[in-house]
Amino acid sequence: MKFVEEVVVEEFLPTFRSMLAAELRERDFTQHEVAEALGISQSAVSKYAHGSVSQCQAVLDDERVQDLVVRIAEGLAAGDMSSVQALVEAEVLIRRLEQGDLLATLHEEAMPELAEYDGDFAIHDPESDVRTTEQVLSSVRRGVRTLTSASGFAGYIPNVGSNLVECLPDAAGIEDVAAIPGRIFDIKGRATVPSDPEFGVSEHVAGVLLSAREAGTDVRAAVNIRYDDDIVQQFADAGYETVEFDPDAPTDPIVAALADGADDDTFVLYQTGGYGIEAITYVLAPDAPTAARVVREVLL
């Protein structure tokens, strides 16, 4: 009797880790950094580097495995992907390959009796909350890097600071929105990000996003920048719908302003200020990288 987990441990993992170790080394990771990223010893990394670990040719040749190895290596190298997300993405692929696919075939070869049955192993749900949460955090990281790496973005940060937020697909409240704790501030002409994105740390921009969704739009991300007439006009000239709202309205001003809906999946909201309220422009989009890209392409 041979378990599919044994196939994973004996055939898939050594091959996958050796492929990932090689990709990370190509991205200038030290042997110590590779060991930390993979959760293995430096001696194991050395064995992978010298070809001392047996590899499964079927796993090596699988394009999905190759693509995931490259994606994880790029994400870890760029800082977009956490070790948790890397683990979850690998686990999801493993479970998929167990379901009538590559690992199921290897399992049947090791235990031919399984070929008589028409079933698969639905062990993990690829749409798990953990995976979705990590994907949103990764998306915010990519968007923040797009903004902060652009020359001149600091000049568009309002006095209250900027934030880039993205929510879960079925967001119900602030706790379902990922953002930068403490916001992004202009410090001596440089956009400064205090820490990694978290859920439930934004009320201002997250609240705008949730109100826009309550109004019936499909947006899942938003970023705020400073307001002036020229900025709004630049977005309009670039073809984006611009909608003004009154921050002093007695009911939810954004829901009221979007009562007729927004025609596009990316649009601009703005308010020109009020008593004790700074004028602000908001770009809303399907995801954080798109919101960041629009700001960069239009203004920077």
Image (cartoon, grey):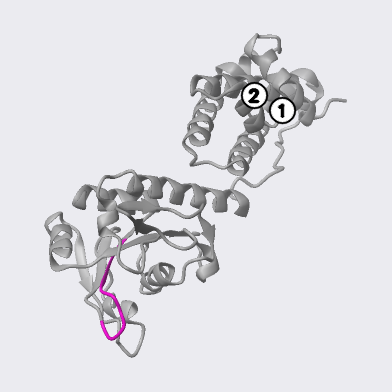
Return the residue found at the far bottom. Answer: 250
Residue 225 within the magenta-colored segment of the rendering? no
Label 2 crowd bin: few (<14), some (14–19), many (20+), radius 10 Å: many
**Which quadrant of the figure has residue 237?**
bottom left
Q: Nearer the viewer, residue 115 or 121?
A: 121
Measured from the top left, where is residue 52 in percent x and y? 70, 9
Measured from the top left, where is residue 160 in percent x and y? 35, 69
- The answer to whether 59 is drawn above or below residue 285 in the figure is above
Do the numbered discs 2 and 1 sit on residues whose CB atoms are within 8 Å?
A: yes
- Disc 2 target residue: 17
Viewport quadrant of the N terminus: top right
Tell me, yes or no, if residue 66 can be seen here: yes
Residue 277 within the magenta-colored segment of the rendering? yes
Examine the residues drawn in magenta and state their main secondary structure: loop
Range drawn in magenta: 274-283
- Disc 1 target residue: 40
Q: What SS does tag 1 mark?
A: loop
Label 1 crowd bin: few (<14), some (14–19), many (20+), radius 10 Å: few
Q: Residue at x 73, y 27 (%)?
A: 8
Q: Nearer the viewer, residue 180 or 113?
A: 180
Q: Nearer the viewer, residue 37 or 294?
A: 37
Q: Residue at x 15, y 54 (%)?
A: 238
